[in-house]
Structure formats: structure tokens, C-alpha cells
Amino acid sequence: MRCSDDSYYVGSARGTTLDKRLGEHQAGIRPGCTRQRRPVTLVYAEGIRSHHGCHRHGTAHQGLEPSEERSADAKRSG
């Protein structure tokens, strides 16, 4: 998700649907960084079979500038 300050948040919808999880972030229900950075926009979603795979994808984006993250996602999506 891209936050209102152009930072990115990477997470999982494990145990729920993507739409419900996005709605929770939009409503400020989810604790953490997105609450203060609303509204958020879903910019990329991928089905990953394991929580470990999701964590690996998220850590690949840590420390990148927003433009670098957009570039990385554009390359991944083709």
C-alpha cells in the first residue's frame, strides 16, 4: 500500500480477505504506521502461499525510496 506521505506499507491479509484488510487500514482499525498515514492506496497485491514468502517480499522493500519501490514493483508486474 502507498500511504498519504508516499511511504509504503507491506503486509499480509492472512486470515481474512484483501478487501477487508484494506478497509481496516483505511478506517484506522489496524494498529501501526498506516493509522497516521491515511488514506492508503493498494498499489500491488500478490498471492503468496506462505507467511515466510510474504515476509521475504516485504523485507526486500525496506529502506528503499518511494521511487525505487515503484520501480521494483513495476519490474515485478511486467
Image: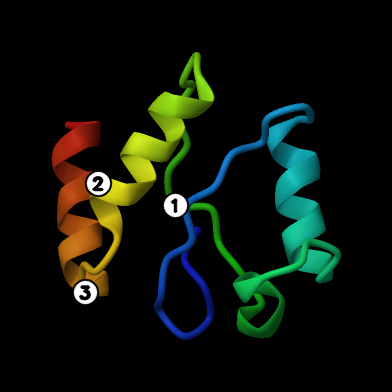
Any part of residue 13 in sight:
yes
Q: Amino acid at mark 1?
A: Val
- Determine whether, in the image, residue 75 is placed left or right of residue 51: left
Q: CA distance from mark 1 to mark 2?
A: 9 Å
Q: Nearer the viewer, residue 6 or 34?
A: 34
Q: Amino acid at mark 2?
A: Asp
Mark 1 near mark 2, Cβ–Cβ under 8 Å?
Answer: yes
User: In the image, is residue 64 above or below residue 43?
Assistant: below
Q: CA distance from mark 2 to mark 3?
A: 12 Å
Mark 2 near mark 3, Cβ–Cβ under 8 Å?
Answer: no
Q: Secondary structure at mark 3?
A: loop
- Residue under pointer 3: 65
- Residue under pointer 1: 43
Residue 53 badge? none
Q: CA distance from mark 3 to mark 1?
A: 15 Å
Residue 73 badge? 2
Q: Quadrant of residue 8?
A: bottom left
At 80% from the left and 42% from the top, the residue drawn is 20
Q: Earlier in the sequence, mark 1 or mark 2?
A: 1
Q: Quadrant of the C terminus?
A: top left
Q: Nearer the viewer, mark 2 or mark 3?
A: 3
At 20% from the left and 35% from the top, the residue drawn is 76
Within 10 Å of the Cα at label 1, are there few (<14), some (14-19), or many (20+) other Cα atoms? few
Q: Earlier in the sequence, mark 2 or mark 3?
A: 3
Within 10 Å of the Cα at label 3, are there few (<14), some (14-19), or many (20+) other Cα atoms? few
At 21% from the left and 74% from the top, the residue drawn is 65
Q: Nearer the viewer, mark 3 or mark 1?
A: 3
The extreme top residue here reads 49
Measured as percent of width and height from the top left, residue 40 is found at: 60, 68
Measured as percent of width and height from the top left, residue 32 is found at: 67, 70
Q: Amino acid at mark 3?
A: Glu
User: In the image, is residue 67 above or below residue 15?
Assistant: below
